[in-house]
Amino acid sequence: MSNQEKAEALKGQGNKALQAGNIDDAIKCYTDAIALDGSNHVLFSNRSAAYAKSGKYQESLADAEKTVEIKPDWPKGYSRLGAALGFLNRHEEALEAYEEGLKHDPNNAQLKDGKKEAKDKLVGPAGSQPINNPFNDPTMYAKLSTDPRTKDLMKDPSFMTILNALQTDPKALGMYLQDKRVMTALGVLLGVDLQGAEPPSDPTPEPPKPQPKKQEKKEEKMEVDLTEDQTKALEEKALGNEAYKKKDFDTAHTHYDNAIKLDATNMSFLTNKAAVYFEQKNYDSCIETCQKAIDVGRDNKADFKLIAKALARIGNSYMKKDDVPQALVFINKSLSEYRDPQLVKRVKEIERVQKEKERLAYINPEISQEEKDKGNDAFKNGNYPVALKHYSEAIKRNPDDAKVYSNRAACYNKLMEFGLALKDCETCIKLDPTWVKGYLRKAGCLLAMKDTVKAGEVYQKAMEIDPNCQEAIDGYRNAIMSNDDDPEAIKKRAMNDPEVQDILSNPSMRVILEQMQKDPGALKEHLQNPEVAGKIQKLMSAGLIAIR
């Protein structure tokens, strides 16, 4: 049984387990199947659904993104992606996913329903437009910590958890509009008194049913007492961010350093400081600080996206240092933590540029000449495989040398590889269209391939470049004589020529040919038309007609 068949069997087991409500078993089956067939988009789609049912929305999102990456024209993949983003309250991105899916299947009911639901989530209370999120204010912690109305609230761990959620996800504000603490904080940030305000009569629709389970899990992990130092550290970070935006980098460094001293467990302070170094073009310090941030993050179980961000920043620093191999190492490490689609595209472009850079760096005309000479010696001794090896290396070292392609073509001819020989001849002529030997070599290949008509045309081209080239004159004569040997063979080869087929299928040309057959004197009149004359010349060179 092949790996694909084994994967299909595991997929079937996973589907049954999912239908029976055994979600963990289903996830295991799909994971085992993916290990056998990692290019099957359906496996990632199914596991995305299983993760969503278990409330693991980040994992569900990662699998949905992988599904779309493998099969970008599959509408169901965008449905999975939109659902996962919706569970994470990322409704704008969910809407974009559903709209992208509808481009591939405009009548897909599931995508239409998802799009409508995502749009509904983007609408504020009583159908109004969403409120601008004041919790994004970088001075939020400083304001709330100093205002008498919210000073004591800042010591409440559950309230701090809500503030963190509101700061990182602006669309989460609608979930907490009935919380009096949030309303009080909102009043402080907006500079108005909302203590007497009534809660909205038409609150934002509740998140999907599995979402409360996810929120509870997040709160359980984050329910820790924030010390006074940790609160102050967040305030310092906000001040550092403000200075960074103003490009006041020295002040930003000071605030981030203060934050690090107050709370050495938060890696974001270090990554922000690294960002300042990056802007200052101090890439070595940026790399060193990001490495420290990663160590702190791993020790304190930081979000994998934060780890990925630090690794990507190291990669970007190496790119600025023009160390592309090291940059790719760290960018790929970042993708192993979190598969950012934009970063995936960037890696492909970097790899393409790197390959071209390596190719250009490999070019060395002097070494190319040495390899060419070795190839010539081997060719003279009849050792054609060795000659071919040296000519190929000479081409890599100097791909613009037309003569080396001609030499390799001669080698291919000796090895009876006429198709490869012809390709090298065409490259040779393209690089140097005035070099007669390239045409002679090509004509020789065509003769070896029994295509005497085209060989004759190439010899003619060689004579146009050098009318006194005896090899071209003799070759042309031999090609014409070969044409006369077997009329049936000549006709068969000519009829395989697309240009000849077009001429003979043209009604006007058929009439002209009939006139010439009945009245040879009509030829003179028709030859006055350059287009007709060219077509008659083609039929003559193909051996299909003769003028006596």
Image (cartoon, helix red, strand yellow):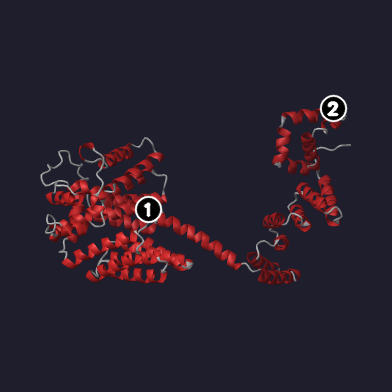
Q: Quadrant of residue 378?
A: bottom right
Q: Is residue 337 above or below residue 203?
A: below
The residue under label 1 is: 66
Sort mark 2 into few (<14), some (14-19) or many (20+) by Cα contacts within 10 Å: few
> Which label is found at residue 518?
2
> Vertical placement of 516 versus 47: above or below?
above
Looking at the image, residue 273 lies above or below residue 472:
below
Q: Quadrant of residue 115?
A: top left
What is the number of the mark on residue 241?
A: none
Q: Residues at badges 2 and 1 in contact (C-beta under 8 Å)? A: no
- How many other residues sit within 10 Å of disc 1, few (<14), some (14-19) or many (≥20)? many
Q: Quadrant of the C terminus?
A: top right
The answer to which of 260 and 122 lies nearer the viewer is 260
Amino acid type, residue under disc 2 in the picture: Lys
Helix, strand or loop at label 2? It is: helix
Residue 266, image x, y percentages: 25, 66
Label 1, secondary structure: give it: helix
Residue at image point 37% right, 53% down: 66
Q: Position of residue 443 (x, y in %)?
A: 76, 53
Q: Of label 2 and label 1, which has the lower sequence position?
A: 1
